[in-house]
Amino acid sequence: MKLPLKKLQIVICGLLFTIMLYSQQGFVHEQSDGYMWPEEESVLAKLGSWQDLKFGVLFHWGLYSVPGIVESWSICSEDVDWIPRDSMMKYEAYKRWYWGLKEQFNPVDFDPDQWSTVMQQAGMKYAIFTTKHHDGFSMFDTKESDFSIAQGPFANHPRADVARFVFDAFRQKDFMVGAYFSKPDWHNQNYWWDYYATPNRSVNYRIERHPQRWEKFKQFTYNQIEELMTHYGDIDILWLDGGWVAPPRQDIDMEKIAGMVRENQPDILMVDRTIRGKFENYQTPERSIPAAQLSYPWESCIPLSSDWGWIPDAKFKTAGEVIALLIEVAAKGGNLLLGVGPTPQGIIQPEVEEILGEVGDWLDKNGRGIYGTHITPHYQSGNVWFTAAKNSQTLYAHYIPANQDEQTTFIEWEGNRPAKGSKITLLQTKKQVKWQMIGGKTRIYLPVIQNRDRMPLVFSFQKE
């Protein structure tokens, strides 16, 4: 069935409207119950280096970027509010329309150097790129499928092997680089077999009745990950999504995959997210920050807007909101992975560049209180959060204004008492501030400075 142009336009408009109804939370992966430390010394060393970076970026960019809709999920037939799909089109017709976006995805302005420059200026230190989301559309030149960016209208572009150029652009700026890869593949006939309906996100046939079909899917998954691990240079992180693809029902033989990955990338961090065990080297709470400090490595992944990918007229977090997230995450011992969606044309839009530039300006002055810091047992007092330098004697107090209208000449906190007679320095100005102990609280008198945007202030001091 071929839709008339007018009806297709109505459908697309309807899709964009449903974005407004899409819950800002959407689908959230649950955090794993427990953690298992890696045994390999090189992996532990890489993990320690990664924890020092504190701030990274996650790029979702794919077919869904063309109309600006939620990533992949609209082709999943689950009936939940956060999966938007226009009701004027029957489900199978909708899937055909979605798969057909391959013929429209032609990001001729794709500029990975602009991406890496913007993120470097934002103060980010590592980058994870979505090489394939659940819809199965590969953003690298896979030989296992023709459903990829390198096979459509972008095929003859010199940067058609998109992932290669993204990884290279960030490596050149000394970023750690990571490959996001979806274990489920809804385009693959050995996962969603069109002989049956697709009632939910999972494999749509009984594996025990069709074991050969599942074996083909396992080999396909292995082969694609092997391509990424052998043809795209040094990869620091393999970030596997789709935690429902796991034993006992959907066993893709992670032991075999991990063996191949480690053979080719010996110290890579493997993140089989939400699957507790030796293949989840750090945890990834989604759209949230843990309620308290955790004793093992973790990363909060939170989008800059309400969605991971690009959507039209997005409402973005302010620079101050991003910084406040980063401070809380660092005080609790984690990293912040900020989700950014490049435009359908392949650039980081000016609004995002401006926000991230403000974040970077703040980190230029205050990053000493974030990068390479450790946790301190008493990590919060009201709207003041604490991090510790590696010597554990220098503490950083991060004051986050409660609101834009808050006017005060001093701040106070409990615990983490400065050493008697020590100096407290405001990192933004590198100047000392006046302080005293009053009623068991540390009181800092705020200097008159230009802080019209009410950005967080960071103070360094020697602890008692």
Image (tube, rainbow, N blue to C red):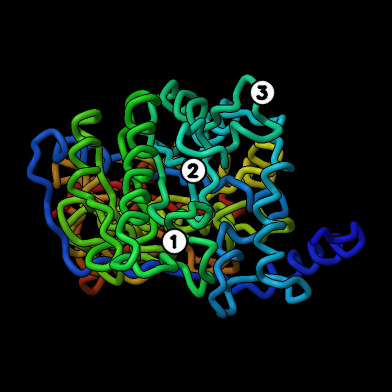
Alpha carbons under labels 1 and 2: distance apart: 13 Å
| Residue type beneath disc 3 | His
Q: Secondary structure at mark 3?
A: loop
The quadrant of the image that shows the N terminus is bottom right
Residues at marks 3 and 1, CA–CA distance in whole angstroms: 46 Å
Query: Is residue 359 depicted above or below 250 in this figure?
Result: above
- Residue drawn 54% across the image and 28% down it: 161
Res. 398 in view: no
**Residue carrying label 1:** 400
Residue drawn 81% across the image and 64% down it: 13
Q: Is residue 256 visible?
A: yes
Residue 4 appears left or right of 160 = right
Residue 157 image label:
3
Residue type (three-letter) at the residue carrying disc 2? Trp
Residue designated by label 2: 362
Left or right: 352 as drawn, with respect to 455: right
**Earlier-in-chain disc, 3 versus 1:** 3
Sort mark 1 into few (<14), some (14-19) or many (20+) by Cα contacts within 10 Å.
Answer: many
Measuring from the top left, give residue 7's x and y in whole percent.
88, 65
In-front residue for pair 123/224: 224
As helix, strand or loop, the secondary structure at mark 2 comes to helix
